[in-house]
Image: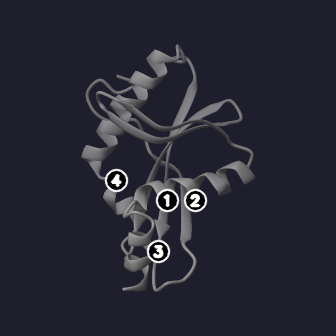
Amino acid sequence: NTADRRLNTMGGSCGVAGEKLAEKPLKRRGYRILARGHRQRLGEIDLVALDGQCIVFVEVKSRTNVNSGLQAVDRSKQEKLTRAALVYLKEKRLLESQTRFDVISVLYADGSQPQLQHIRHAFEATGRGSMFS
């Protein structure tokens, strides 16, 4: 379809394009981007942002169909993100900081402009070894 062709012209990098798009509404809301694509041994955090005094770990899910990106952030993904966030906080010596997990869904459909949905507090830190266990 048209959306798939457009994504292919972006080098097949739907995720990277979605992450760049996701930054714009965050910045408009006053968030400060601290890190993009933060990779470490436990995985990658798409965006790390500061919302006031709260460190926000943002998972960006880009899709070309109507299925919500939120559905792709299942319990297993939440646990991976929690562990990666904990490593980030330890690396930056920010363990005492207030944190939350958001998800931004980017939908590329029917050749129209991408639609973004920002879900604040999408999930709590989960899993063994989570920030609060």
Question: Can you tell which mark lies on residue 108?
Answer: 3
Residue 83, by quadrant, is top left
Of callouts 2 and 3, the N-terminal one? 2
Is mark 3 in CB contact (under 8 Å) with mark 1? no
Q: Quadrant of the C terminus?
A: top left
Q: Residue at x 29, y 30 (%)?
A: 42
Q: Name the front one of labels 4 and 3.
A: 3
The local secondary structure at tag 2 comes to helix
Seen in the picture, residue 33 relative to 75 is either above or below; the reply is above
Mark 2, residue position: 21
Secondary structure type for disc 1: helix
Residues at marks 2 and 1 touching, judged by CB atoms closer than 8 Å: yes
Gap between marks 2 and 3, in whole Å?
11 Å
100 and 66: which is toward the camera: 66
Q: How is the image coloured?
A: one colour
Q: Amino acid at mark 1?
A: Ala
